[in-house]
Amino acid sequence: MSRIRLAVRENVLSDPARVTLQMYRDYLDTLGRGWVCEQDGEIVGFSYAAHGDASIWALFVLPECEGRGIARRLLALATDYLFGLGERQVVLSTAADTRADRFYAAQGWARGAMKDDREVFFTLPRP
């Protein structure tokens, strides 16, 4: 997961040490659930849903695999999981004015408040 997270061209971590391997484990084991997309035995994308705050903690795809519908499917798995737990809405945040910002809007998420003019919050109500 870390390899994919560090390979992205947008939403680049200013300090890669901020997201530790233990955090990936915690979100997978106790704080939520995660999914991966594999192609030819290689993980090319992943998503994590956090059940504590009904959020999408992470959604990333290798740059060379973008545009193939991988992110859309991984996002659907994560949101379906949270709605299956009874959540009324799912939330996430991403860097403003990026492909991710436009992607979430195109998937029907409602664009909300901004934080520091760099981060935008989105919500998706239960269908």
Image (cartoon, rainbow, N blue to C red):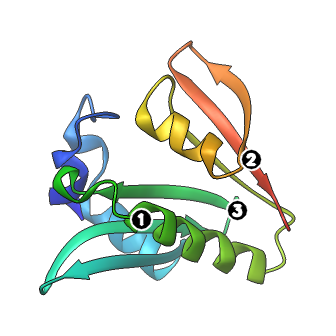
| In the image: residue 61, left or right of residue 116 | left
What residue type is disc 2 on?
Thr
Identified at 46% across, 40% down, the residue is 100
Badge nearest the viewer, 2 or 3:
2
Residue hosting label 3: 54
Identified at 23% across, 36% down, the residue is 9
Residue 105 drawn at (x, y percent): 64, 41
In this view, 86 is above or below 117:
below
What residue type is disc 1 on?
Gly
Relative depth, front residue between 22 and 98: 98
Quadrant of the image containing the C terminus: bottom right
* Residue extending furthest toward the top: 117
- SS at circle 1: loop
What residue type is disc 3 on?
Ala
Count residues near mark 3 (Cα–Cα under 10 Å), then give few for <14, some for 14-19, many for 20+. many
Count residues near mark 2 (Cα–Cα under 10 Å), then give few for <14, some for 14-19, many for 20+. some
Identified at 12% across, 85% down, the residue is 40
Q: Distance between the residues labelled 2 and 1?
A: 21 Å
| In the image: residue 76, left or right of residue 17 | right
Identified at 21% across, 50% down, the residue is 63
Residue hosting label 2: 123
Residue hosting label 1: 69
| In the image: residue 9, left or right of residue 24 | left
